[in-house]
Image (cartoon, rainbow, N blue to C red):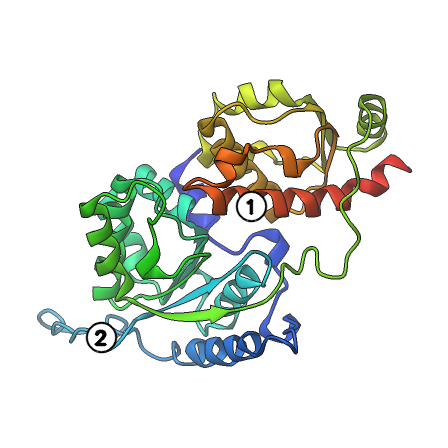
Amino acid sequence: MPAERLVAEMVPPPRFDSVRFDTYNPDPAQPSQAEAVEVLAGFASGLGGAHATGSGKRRWFGRAPKAAAPTGPRGIYLDGGYGVGKTHLLASLWHATPAEPALKAFGTFVELTNLVGALGFQQTVQTLGGHRLLCIDEFELDDPGDTVLVSSLLSRLVEQGVALAATSNTLPGKLGEGRFAAADFLREIQGLSAHFRPLRIDGQDYRHRGLPEAPAPFSDEQVAKAAYATQGASLDDFPGLLEHLAKVHPSRYGALTDGITAVCLTDVVPVPDQSTALRLVVLADRLYDREIPVLASGVPFDRLFSDDMLNGGYRKKYFRAISRLTALARDAKPLVSQ
């Protein structure tokens, strides 16, 4: 995939094209949700005007004076469970920030590390350094190398006046717990947490709040019939799909779904190992971003991951994947009756 495409695609995904702060429906029982809207709207309005470093002003002679380091946190960190609307709010912040789209970037943590891999560290700093805002969705620190990389990148961007916003299911100072927990790794996390003002968002998963249970898996015959009756649908046996994902870099999973209107899977079985499970998580995120329904036979999606996986260091990713795949399975139910 060309590096230019990676940069151009750093915008909110299709599912969040039209979201705004006024389309977010706070739960009256959770006052932190309404508070988050108010705080983020104020944060967005504060990003108008000149760039924090003053780099937007042209100087006829000499170099621009070195800007003073920004005081206080230069970012907001949205912390909350699955389905409380963090990505909705993050995308709303991107839309509300008074800057041209070319001066705002939005991507998942994985997409950000992929961008560095495609452009190189220095080129990424140069590319994003003139931005007004960088939004990072699903902030994860699963690998000590990525921890150092992203910590260094964000520090450089903050020095250049870039505002930051991120979502995750864990507070900044707690990132990494239950993972590798290396001393150097935790030290990097603590330094990174100083860049953010944590903003807690409480609530239940809106994808399941007040909605019927996800449909039970269908038969192989029903799935195949629906696939052939649906224009643009794919049809794969699940073990074969998992085998194919191992041969494709996760940065290309989004492109893998181009032109697909529905994903039909037969013989869904529990994933055999952690590496396979993590690849499936990335695919689930890309399918959810693009609102592609998933029709399946075999085991239900809440049995994809073993108890050891759901109790391990990557449990937050697995529960997010289950939540999103369940929502997509619900979206796919009408395909069977077509």
Query: Visible in this render: residue 123?
Result: no
Residue type for callout 2: Pro
Q: Which residue carries the number 2 mark? A: 70
In this picture, residue 145 sits left or right of residue 236: left
Separation of disc 1 and disc 2 at Cα? 37 Å
Q: Quadrant of the N terminus?
A: top left
- How far across and how far down the image is residue 71, in percent? 22, 78
* Outermost residue to the right: 337
- Please state which of residues 196 and 183 is positioned toward the viewer in this rendering: 183
Up the image or down, 221 lies above or below 64; here it is above
- Please state which of residues 20 and 196 is positioned toward the viewer in this rendering: 196
Residue type for callout 1: Phe
- How far across and how far down the image is residue 62, in percent? 8, 70
Up the image or down, 252 lies above or below 200; here it is above
Up the image or down, 162 lies above or below 317; here it is below
Name the disc covering residue 319, or none: 1
1 or 2: mark nearer the eye? 1
Q: Residues within 10 Å of mark 1 (few under 14, many from 20)?
A: some
- How far across and how far down the image is residue 326, in percent? 68, 44
Question: For the point 26% across and 55% down, which residue is it?
Answer: 189
Q: Please tell me which of labels 1 and 2 falls first in the chain.
A: 2
Query: Visible in this render: residue 188?
Result: yes
Q: Quadrant of the C terminus?
A: top right
Name the disc covering residue 200, or none: none
Q: Secondary structure at mark 2?
A: loop
Question: For the point 61% across and 19% down, which residue is it?
Answer: 239
Up the image or down, 18 lies above or below 254; here it is below
Question: For the point 53% across and 41% down, which residue is it?
Answer: 318
Q: Residues within 10 Å of mark 2 (few under 14, many from 20)?
A: some
- Please state which of residues 290 and 187 is positioned toward the viewer in this rendering: 187
- Please state which of residues 173 and 231 is positioned toward the viewer in this rendering: 173
Q: Secondary structure at mark 1?
A: helix
